[in-house]
Image (cartoon, helix red, strand yellow):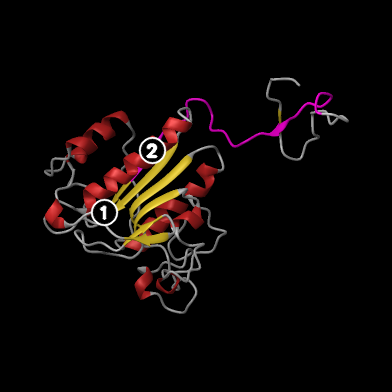
Amino acid sequence: MNDAIVEYEAGTAFPGVIGRTLDESSPAWPVPPRAPEGAPNVVIFVLDDVGYGQLSAFGGLCETPNIDGLAKRGLRYSNFQTTALCSPTRGCLLTGRNHHTLGLSAVVEFSLGFPGHNAVMGFEHGFLSEMLVDRGYNTFAVGKWHLTPSHESTAAGPYDRWPLGRGFERYYGFLGGETDQWYPDLIHDNHAVMPPSTPTDGYHLNADLADHAIDFIKDAHVNAPEKPFFLTRPRRPAVGDAVG
């Protein structure tokens, strides 16, 4: 057998050899999704209730040195339309579509049974995560989701509008619009979990989300160091939180 790995594109003829015995045969494999060489890692932070001019990376008075560091090594955009509501803005950001087209005229908890207002995003509206995972990226999300209709957010599903149903390979956070930052309602991938510790032990959701984001990236990198990742970290700051 030939030790070299032979690959072929889907829909093309099998280039290997199928003989009467294994010694007379040579295998070939369908080409897996691969990101282009040098493809960048992508990290998106979404902060609710934070104005464009508040962070120090954009000249504001709230000092955010970690975000400043990312901004200096990345790209800064200054022309994004926000709908001033959580679910619609998140939907627009992840799809590039108008929020009414997505059925997100309001947050998912306030949906109405009319076109453009029912919080039921059609699967014809591709998510950035769906596009990137098909192009060889690992895709992770941590934090607030707020894009699943309320009646689909229970253990009965359906799960196709949960993060793992929309292109994210791993998820850790909460599905609704808000949760207690010290006693959160947590979802890990597709199932509910309890917080790993309590506030008396120093628990806070912010650190928990960061730890899981690091673990997701580390687990993937150990097994495929050449593979880029896309991480989105939607977040709703709570009273008393420090941003940065």
Where residue 219 sits: x, y (%)?
Answer: 41, 37
**The label number, if any, that marks residue 217 in the structure image:** 2
- The residue furthest bottom is 113
Task: Choose top left, top right, bottom left or bottom right for residue 148.
Answer: bottom left
Give the mark nearer the N terminus: 1 vs 2: 1
Q: Are marks 1 and 2 in contact (CB under 8 Å)?
A: no
Instruction: Please give the name of the residue rendered at 28% of the width and 49% of the height, measured from the top-left corner.
Output: 209
Residue in front for this viewpoint, 136 or 85: 136
Report the magenta stretch's main SS. loop
Where residue 239 sits: x, y (%)?
Answer: 13, 59
- The residue furthest right is 20
- The residue pinned by badge 1 equals 196
Identify residue type, mark 1.
Pro
Q: Residues within 10 Å of mark 2 (few under 14, many from 20)?
A: some
Taking the image as shown, residue 46 lies to the left or right of residue 227, namely left
Taking the image as shown, residue 165 lies to the left or right of residue 212, namely right
Instruction: Please give the name of the residue rendered at 40% of the width and 62% of the height, measured from the top-left corner.
Output: 147
Above or below 90: residue 45: above
Report the label total: 2
Instruction: Please give the name of the residue rendered at 11% of the width and 43% of the height, measured from the top-left corner.
Output: 61
Instruction: Please give the name of the residue rendered at 42% of the width and 54% of the height, measured from the top-left corner.
Output: 189
- Is 28 magenta? The answer is yes
Where residue 198 sits: x, y (%)?
Answer: 18, 57
Taking the image as shown, residue 78 lies to the left or right of residue 147, namely left
Could you tell me which secondary element the residue under label 1 belongs to?
A: loop
Above or below 216: residue 184: below
Could you tell me which secondary element the residue under label 2 belongs to?
A: helix
Magenta extent: 22-44
* Residue 179 visible to the viewer: yes
**The label number, if any, that marks residue 46 in the structure image:** none
Taking the image as shown, residue 113 lies to the left or right of residue 195, namely right
